Amino acid sequence: MADNYLEKRVEELRQNQGRKRTVVRNNVPLESLLKRNRSFRGYDRSVEVTEEQLKETVKTTTWVASGMNAQPLRFRLVTGDEAGKIHPLVKLGAALPEEHLPHPGEEPSAYIVICSTVPENRIVDMDLGIAAQSILLKATEMGLGGIFILNFKPEEVQSALSLQMKPLAVLAVGKPAERIFLMPCNEGDPLAYYRKDGVHYVPKIKVEDLII
């Protein structure tokens, strides 16, 4: 009986070796997400972002660090027609005023307005950066994109959305309609982003010059 068992096991192994195995990898490497997570200022308006998708991005903030674990940030999800209230209250591409970004018809499909339950301070600002990066990385993983906006009208956004808390930042989210390339540069080179032939270029200092 033992011999028969061993013979069967050997035969099974031989058969398995002849089969092709398909390995499905769902995880996107962090390096890829970081490179693809750019500040997009133009979006494909034919692709609508849903509240459920925004909720998925905000879910990441329940896993990340928070100063003293205070978790003061709160998030208002803005989609559909309501997003139209925010379009005129935010400014994109301040370094490219001649472009008048976003171009008509390329406004973000949705927004996430970030507020705080406590007065803004250094720790809150630290949490804000961590949360914004996490949300935008998740959006990138989902095939979307966005931009972290500080150039907006807080009081008017607060009024437009009937918020009890003052907004600290706004994240735009949508399906990117731009091509953006990172350009390695040296310490001391110009760092202003620019556009040429419809392509957006962003200089980034090389790691050798960042380490001191």
Image (cartoon, grey):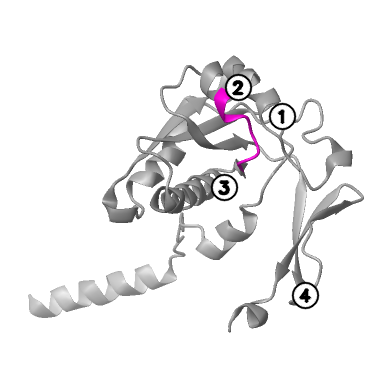
Label 3: how many Cα within 10 Å (few below 14, some 14–19, many 20+) = many
Mark 1 or 3: the one toward you: 1
Question: Is 134 located above or below residue 206 in the figure?
Answer: above
* CB-based contact (under 8 Å), mark 4 and mark 2: no
What residue lies at 47% left-to-right and 16% top-to-bottom? Answer: 162
Q: Residue 148 at what x, y percent from top left?
A: 59, 44
In the figure, 114 relative to 23: above or below?
Answer: above
Residue picked out by circle 2: 83
Q: Nearer the viewer, mark 2 or mark 3?
A: 2
- Tell me the crowding category of disc 2: few under 14, some 14 to 19, or many 20 or more residues within 10 angstroms, Cα based: some
Decide which of 29, 86 is in the foreground and name it: 86
Q: Which residues are magenta?
A: 149-155
Residue with the mark numbered 3 = 140
> Who comes first in sequence, dot 1 or dot 3?
1
Amino acid on which the number 1 mark rests in the picture: Glu
Give the residue pinned by disc 4. 188
Name the amino acid, label 3. Thr
Residue beneath label 1, please?
107
Disc 1 vs disc 2: Cβ atoms closer than 8 Å? yes
Q: Quadrant of residue 68?
A: bottom left
* Label 2, label 3: how far apart the Cα atoms are: 20 Å
